[in-house]
Amino acid sequence: MTFPTLPTTTAQIRTNVPIIKTVALDGSEVVRSGAAQYFSISLSLRNLTETQQRAILGHIASVGGGVNAFDLVLPGGLSDTSTGRTDSLTTNATRNSGSTSVSVTGGPTSTIILNAGDYVKFGANKIYQVTADATTDGSGNATINIFPGLLETSNSGETVVTNAIPFNVRYLSDLTELAVGIRMLGNIDIDVKEVI
């Protein structure tokens, strides 16, 4: 189920990298990743009409609060590539889990197709962030550098999603508060976490 399309006043996206840090008696530190990276998103929806309020509350009920996952396309173009490109890219090589680069084909020649900071999705539910601008060569091929490393193997021929990327998320709280003011306009704050 997809989150309703509504006007969002603010959207905040955070990358979470669980780490384990050990400090020795001499002060030296060892830092390592403790689990998979994931995104968390906060949405502030303001001045919602009664119909919009009911759409959100109905959605929350339909997914069982924080129990079931759903798709969320970030508002305001945040789920789209910052280059404005809408190319039909596919992976053109198999990459094993842990790889921090993915080879793609299908872009225009000698063009920046993704900028550092853009989001991208390969096949599975996980969303990745581009770490360096990706420019195609004379044949329309490019290498996309990503963070985190692939959680699953990416096979050749997979569709690369670069626009209207659906983040697979679940609500973080069982509690939903609706504040209604004058003229019955409501405000709702929502926090969700990427489901991997």
Image (cartoon, rainbow, N blue to C red):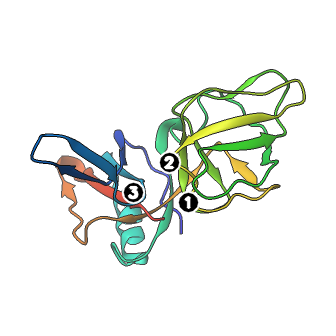
Q: Is residue 127 above or below residue 106?
A: below
Q: Nearer the viewer, mark 3 or mark 1?
A: 1
Distance Cα–Cα, label 3 vs label 1 = 36 Å
Residue 169 seen in the figure = yes
Identify the residue position indicated by label 3 in the image: 52
Residue 116 placed where, x, y %? 55, 29
How far across and how far down the image is residue 58, in percent? 39, 71
Give the secondary structure at mark 2: loop
| Residue 48 visible here | no
Instruction: Please name the residue shown 31% across and 56% down the image.
Output: 191
**Residue underneath mark 1:** 151
**Which mark is first along the chain, 3 or 2?**
3
Looking at this view, is 8 or 91 the one in front? 91
| Structural crowding at the residue carrying mark 3, measured as other residues with C-alpha within 10 Å and reported as few (<14), some (14–19) or many (≥20) | some
Is 97 drawn above or below residue 174 in the view shown?
A: above
Question: What kind of residue is marked 3?
Answer: Gln
Element under label 1?
Answer: loop
Which residue is identified by label 2? 148
